[in-house]
Amino acid sequence: MKYFGEHQSIECGGANVIAKKIVSSSPLNHEVFGKCLKYICTRDGEAEIVKELNPKKTQLTHPVSALNHGDKIVANSFYVLEKGLKARRLVKVKFSGAHNANKIITENYTFAEITKPYPISTKIENRIPLDFISPFKQLAK
Amino acid sequence: MSGQLIIRSVISSSEYSVKPIETEAYLEFYDATVNIIQNAFYIHPSFEDEYLKQIDFNSNYNLMVFNSLRKEELFITAIRNLRKKISWITLNNDFQNGDISEKEFDHELEQYPHKYIIDVKLLSNEADINILHDIIIKVDDGFTIDDVSEVFSLDVTGCSGI
């Protein structure tokens, strides 16, 4: 299943991460995840679960993330946290037509969360009726 | 007569006999506190009177002092994290150029974790949100959510559950 909304996330034991721009941060000692590296992915991308967690349980206090094999988040920008301090090497792949993109394959516990969704997906998810937006109805009242 | 001198004179007089503060001294002390608050919160002078009339000094003074101290703490963590980031970039650059082997790279991280690894805590105090908002507006450098967690070592993203 695909996820588009803001703050929607995945948790897994391994993932394929593709984005046009991937920048790794300095190592973090997170309160929840422990020692980990953060990858900030921008300019369109996706993160797909390849390996499920064993046992299949969230490590967060706020359990909303997807856990099944094949689940993916698709967004304009998102971030990925991977346990361990070993930086992954970027591999060039083709993504969205003729555009090149970078790819990472994570092998430890990973958590990915959307920070900036596509503008269309937010409208679809919230399902705002067009009557509510149009100013003519408000003027008539 | 500055605020510090008044406080000193009050303390020195209170050693021998307790006296109530005189009206003139009180007014000067009031001006000094106004300066301190202006420096701490950057209040625009045109709003000074309207804003300060609403404040009850006896109840909010401790809160203001706490906020300014917390702000200082955040600035110090930001500078510390900057230094950590620079040292991490140099180490990573050496590793990728081939000046350091993988064993040496791992050994360096295990031996001196305080030099490279940034501690990140979940944002639990609501007062921090206002302080961060103040700082980010003044810096005005297009902060993202990811930047804030690295600079101030506070996680503001959705995994904190707020």
Image (cartoon, coloured by chain):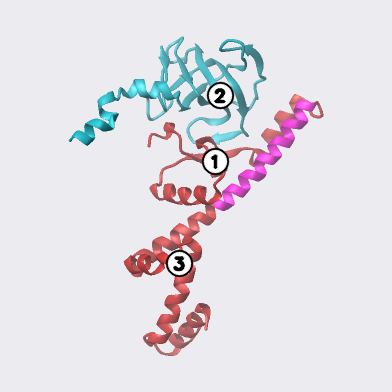
Chain colours: A cyan, B red
Q: Residues within 10 Å of mark 3 (few under 14, many from 20)?
A: few
Q: Residues within 10 Å of mark 1 (few under 14, many from 20)?
A: few
Q: Secondary structure at mark 3?
A: helix
Specify which label sits upstream in the sequence, 1 or 3. 3
Q: Let me know if residue A58 appears in the view.
A: no
- Image quadrant in which you'd find residue A67: top left
Which subunit holds the residue at mark 2? A
For the residues marked 3 and 2, what is the alpha-carbon distance in whole angstroms? 43 Å
**Eyeballing the image, is A31 above or below A111?**
below
For the residues marked 1 and 3, what is the alpha-carbon distance in whole angstroms? 27 Å
Write down the residue under mark 1.
Answer: B142
Write down the residue under mark 3.
Answer: B45
**Eyeballing the image, is A21 above or below B89?**
above
Do callouts 3 and 2 point to residues on the same chain? no
User: Residue A43, which numbered label?
Assistant: 2
The quadrant the N terminus of chain A occupies is top left
